[in-house]
């Protein structure tokens, strides 16, 4: 099996859909020797901010000399982004090898009459095996969706369970209220464990607190007052922390200060348990942290951003940050979204900064058709077009823009990676990936 075969096989598993439950992942990991039982985890659930928080934590651990695995989803540019050790993506050859080995076990399971694991379950099991055999000291593990029945929840006892901001998303699966969704996310809390949470809205916080009480888990809430924003500009943010002073990062957004507060609370607890995490390692870790596709500046003159915001809270966070950096400037907004999302609210929020809307549809059956989307856009903005391809939408945005304009593509991770690639081809001025060496 080569890399192309591996990717083809993994994506072919999409036919099994998304089916919550731990039976399939349990059967698969058992046949792989339960590698997850020999790893130390920081387990992260939440609606928004999981990936940024995970990126901060893993980068600090790497810069402090700990071999650190990072498992996230979805990917923006290429699949390998989802599984990293010390900031380096799994190699094509390793992905091919581990996919081959996991597939062999799955094939035997199915022959024995077991239900076939889903795509996410297969990748999760593969990541456990990879991180174990590569001898990771710690793995920062992000849930896919929910928590209670998420495949990552097969792990037994993480060092910490972390819950980032909870809001309404995936309501058809997780429930229609904040309490429902918080309960599912809080499913990652283990008896007697340590839980670090974002400063949640009261319904979500009360639910998390009740689950902690039931499981005799220690609940720690990150304090946003520990952090003060100092500077926010294209591609860079500087904030001060009461213990660590000035911290600079390329993960930009007003909301990122809250994610940083959660990450720093996790780091504080790790330090108290014996991890050697000094101020210099923390500052360097935040500076080196990478999280593509989140208020990411990919081009200049005009400034061009991509953001995977795909729910109202994510879009509000984008708009709030945009207004802080560009208080007088309207934007050309490329927007594509899945049909099951609350796109009405997202468009209403975006209309406050939009001079133009350009509707697109990602190459997925879940995408909202461009004509439906453009008709909805016209309720909020007089300047609306749609494009049949992502490249056409990017080209249109450049033709409309002057060097003083701002362009942003939002709404779905399904297409923003393609936007990133196209902008790079057009402008040849995308930012280079920083050196991960600390």
Image: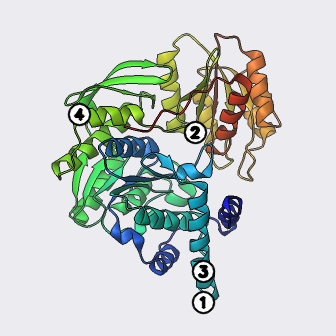
Badge 2 is on which residue?
Answer: 308
Name the residue at 64% across, 23% down. 429
Are circles 1 and 3 on residues that touch, CB within 8 Å?
no
Q: Position of residue 426 (x, y in %)?
A: 74, 25
Name the residue at 71% across, 59% down. 4
Q: Is residue 33 visible?
A: yes
Q: CA distance from mark 2 to mark 1?
A: 40 Å
Name the residue at 55% across, 41% down. 311
Q: Position of residue 61 (x, y in %)?
A: 32, 46
Q: Is residue 283 above or below residue 188?
A: above
Badge 3 is on which residue?
Answer: 115
Q: Which quadrant of the figure has residue 395?
A: top right
In the image, which is nearer the foreground, mark 1 or mark 3?
Answer: 1
Residue 279's label in the rendered image is: 4
Q: CA distance from mark 2 to mark 3?
A: 33 Å
Q: CA distance from mark 1 to mark 4?
A: 53 Å
Q: CA distance from mark 1 to mark 3?
A: 9 Å
In the image, which is nearer the foreground, mark 2 or mark 1?
Answer: 1
Quadrant into which the N terminus falls? bottom right
């Amino acid at each position: 099996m080569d890399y192309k075969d591996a990717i083809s096989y993994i994506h072919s598993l999409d036919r099994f859909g998304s089916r919550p439950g731990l039976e399939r992942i349990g059967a698969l990991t058992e046949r792989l020797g339960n590698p997850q039982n020999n790893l130390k985890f920081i387990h992260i659930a939440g609606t928004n901010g999981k990936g940024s928080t995970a990126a901060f934590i893993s980068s600090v651990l790497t810069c402090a000399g700990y071999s650190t695995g990072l498992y996230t989803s979805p990917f923006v540019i290429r699949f390998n982004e989802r599984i990293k050790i010390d900031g380096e993506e799994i190699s094509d050859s390793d992905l091919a090898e581990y996919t081959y080995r996991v597939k062999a076990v799955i094939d035997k399971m199915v022959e024995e009459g077991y239900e076939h694991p889903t795509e996410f379950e297969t990748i999760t099991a593969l990541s456990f095996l990879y991180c174990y055999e590569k001898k990771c000291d710690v793995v920062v593990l992000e849930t896919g969706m929910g928590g209670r029945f998420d495949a990552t929840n097969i792990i037994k006892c993480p060092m910490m369970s972390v819950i980032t901001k909870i809001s309404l998303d995936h309501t058809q699966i997780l429930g229609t209220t904040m309490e429902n969704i918080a309960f599912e996310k809080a499913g990652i809390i283990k008896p007697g464990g340590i839980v670090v949470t974002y400063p949640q809205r009261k319904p979500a916080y009360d639910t998390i607190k009740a689950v902690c009480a039931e499981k005799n888990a220690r609940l720690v809430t990150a304090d946003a007052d520990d952090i003060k924003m100092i500077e926010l500009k294209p591609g860079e943010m500087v904030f001060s922390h009461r213990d660590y002073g000035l911290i600079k990062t390329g993960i930009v957004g007003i909301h990122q200060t809250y994610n940083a507060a959660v990450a720093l609370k996790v780091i504080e607890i790790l330090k108290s348990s014996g991890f050697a995490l000094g101020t210099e390692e923390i500052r360097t870790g935040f500076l080196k942290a990478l999280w593509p596709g989140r208020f990411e500046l990919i081009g200049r003159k005009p400034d061009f951003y991509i953001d995977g915001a795909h729910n109202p809270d994510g879009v509000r966070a984008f708009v709030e940050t945009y207004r802080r950096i560009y208080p007088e400037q309207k934007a050309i907004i490329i927007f594509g979204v899945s049909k099951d999302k609350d796109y009405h609210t997202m468009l209403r929020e975006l209309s406050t900064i939009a001079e133009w809307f350009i509707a697109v549809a990602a190459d997925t059956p879940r995408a909202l058709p461009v004509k439906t989307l453009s008709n909805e856009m016209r309720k909020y903005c007089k300047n609306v077009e749609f494009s049949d391809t992502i490249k056409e939408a990017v080209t249109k945005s450049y033709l409309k823009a002057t060097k003083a304009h701002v362009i942003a593509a939002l709404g779905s991770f399904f297409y923003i990676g393609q936007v990133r690639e196209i902008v790079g081809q057009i402008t040849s001025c995308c930012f280079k990936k920083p050196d991960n060496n600390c």
